[in-house]
Amino acid sequence: MENDNKATGAFEPKLVAFVCNWCTYVGADLAGTSRLKYASNVRVIRLPCTGRIDFMLILKAFAQGMDGVIVSGCHPGDCHYTVGNYHARRRWILFRSLLDFAGIDVRRVHFAWVSAAEGAKWADLVNKVSGEVRELGPYKEYQGLAGKGIA
Ligand code: FES
């Protein structure tokens, strides 16, 4: 399925955001309740903590048609499970170096910290990532792999 804007026919990226329940999810909710305008092409998946995010989820997201991925949670020192975000950050550093090997441009995956009070930061993040992925164009390399071992 192409991700085209129905009105203009221009490419509109599909993004998925894996966010922690305690900070970024609440920040995204704040952006909504504050009526901040931001790109509507992001699907938010709430997890207990970024430390709980298996990076296979990111590969699966691409296999299932996403063009970009956001991972976001509490700021360092604010994780509700003490060190979950530190584990996530360590994993991200390793995973980032494997992205190129896996055939994924690193600019398609963004790791961020957004607190419950940072609705504006969330809106800016989604707009920024959406714009960057729009410039990269659709990601097709993993499409069709869903259900074939990787996803
Ligand atoms: Fe938010 Fe751990 S609870 S990153």
Image (cartoon, grey):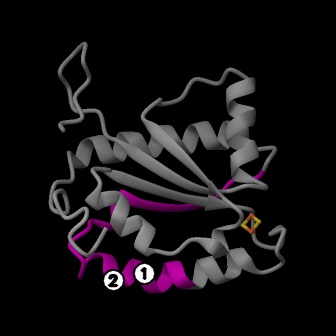
Which residue lies at the image location 27% right of the left edge and 60% below the top edge? 63
Q: Give the crowd class for mark 1: few <14, some 14-19, many >=20 residues within 10 Å.
A: some
The answer to whether residue 67 is left or right of residue 27 is left
Label number found at residue 86 = none
Which residue in the protein does label 2 denote? 98
Can you give x and y, in whole percent of width and height, for residue 81 in the image?
A: 82, 74
| Residue in the foreground of this view, choosing between 41 and 36 | 41
Question: Given the image, on which type of amino acid does mark 1 rest?
Answer: Phe
Q: Give the crowd class for mark 2: few <14, some 14-19, many >=20 residues within 10 Å.
A: few
Can you give x and y, in whole percent of width and height, for residue 112 in the image?
A: 59, 60
The quadrant the C terminus occupies is bottom left
The answer to whether the residues at label 2 and label 1 have Cβ atoms under 8 Å apart is yes
Which residue lies at the image location 17% right of the left edge and 21% below the top edge? 9
**Disc 2 within 8 angstroms of ligand 1 (CB):** no
Where residue 10 sits, quadrant-wise, is: top left
The answer to whether residue 122 is left or right of residue 60 is right
- Quadrant of picture, ligand 1: bottom right
Q: Relative to 55, does residue 30 appear above or below in the rendering?
A: above
Secondary structure under the numbered disc 1 in the rendered image:
helix
Which residue lies at the image location 19% right of the left edge and 64% below the top edge? 145
Which residue in the protein does label 1 denote? 95
Can you give x and y, in whole percent of width and height, for residue 72 in the image?
A: 61, 59
47 inside magenta stretch: no
Q: Relative to 56, does residue 64 appear above or below in the rendering?
A: above
96 inside magenta stretch: yes
Which residue lies at the image location 69% right of the left edge and 32% below the top edge? 31
The answer to whether residue 1 is left or right of residue 33 is left
Query: Could you tell me how far apart the alpha carbons at marks 2 and 1 are, in whole angstroms?
Result: 5 Å
| Residue in the foreground of this view, choosing between 27 and 142 | 142
| Magenta highlight range | 91-115
Question: Given the image, on which type of amino acid does mark 2 rest?
Answer: Leu
Can you give x and y, in whole percent of width and height, for residue 67 in the image?
A: 30, 50
